[in-house]
Amino acid sequence: MLSFGKLVTNEWLKMYKKRSFFIPYAAIAVVIGLVAYMMKSFSLSDGMPSGLEFTAGMFSKNGMGQLLTFLAIIGTAGSVAKEHSLGTIKLLLIRAQSRGKILAAKYVSVLAYILSLSLFALAVSLLAGGLLFGFQAREAGWEDVTLTVLAQLAYSLIYVTVTFMIGVFTRSTGATIGVGMILVLLESLVVGLLSRYDIIKYVLFTNVDLSVYLEGGIPPVQGMTPAFSLIVLAVYMILFLGASFVTFKKRDVA
């Protein structure tokens, strides 16, 4: 267990030492600050949200939901792919650790990165919203904020896991980022095209946005429930990770 912890720490340090590491955090702070300032400047006093409503709105899919996912994809796409392009994968695999443990450490570091982005966005949103709008709970309370953040985390986690698998398959950072972003952008289109078929309930894109179930929202397909979507997403996660680990263990490194 101690050796696995060292592997995770090593992977995190690789990400941290990149010159671009803090750019996503800066982008998040700037976007949230600008949105808060514009809402404060151009909204009527009786139509302003509370700080909690502002935070929940920022974490919605129509707020910063997709931006956080894009930043997570960009930041983690090279976790495996860049090791191949730089040739460092050979040095990594000659260690005493198994390939499975090495890939698991990379995935855990990716999860830590997603969590750090979300927590930073949450802190900045609460700070900006509280300072400009106050923390009085009106239409949204702390429970609404928590559920919205968790739904956003799940949304980002699914797409980053898909991107992680693509990185293992393609060994190309550019291709991994491109495919990962395209999948996010095609989400609504695919759901719309397949909406007439029963199989739509089992498609990843239909289930990935759990925020539709919040505040009594209407599910994408009649009869779908939060439990159903969570089970479908869990099955996809197992398939994505299973394919990643099998490929990484069996592929030869030239």
Image (spheres, rainbow, N blue to C red):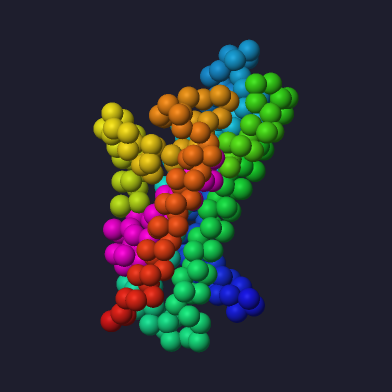
**Is residue 44 inside the magenta stretch?**
no
Residue 239's place in the image compared with 156, above or below, is below
Between 184 and 27, the one lying in front of the other is 184
Q: Please indicate whether residue 56 sits to the left or right of residue 174 in the image.
A: right
Q: Is residue 121 left or right of residue 90?
A: right
Viewed as shown, does residue 25 lie left or right of 168? right
- Whether residue 164 is in magenta: the answer is yes
The one nearer the camera, 196 or 76, is 196
In the image, the segment drawn in magenta is 151-177
Q: Is residue 124 visible?
A: no
- Locate the C terminus and report the quarter of the image it occupies: bottom left
> Measured from the top left, where is residue 68 in percent x and y?
48, 45
**x and y percentages locating residue 47 in the rendered image:** 59, 15
At horizontal 48% and vertical 24% (from top left) the residue drawn is 218
Q: Position of residue 195 (x, y in %)?
A: 31, 30
Q: What residue lies at 51% left-to-right and 74% top-to-bottom?
A: 101
- Assign the N terminus to one quadrant of the image: bottom right
In terms of depth relative to the viewer, which is nearer, 59 or 168? 168
- Above or below 132: residue 167: below
Q: Quadrant of residue 145?
A: top right
Confirm whether residue 220 shows in the render.
Answer: yes
In-image side of 2 versus 225 (left or right) = right
Q: Say above or below: 76 vs 37.
A: below
Number of numbered discs on residues: 0
Q: Residue 172: x, y in percent?
A: 30, 64
x 38%, y 82%: residue: 90
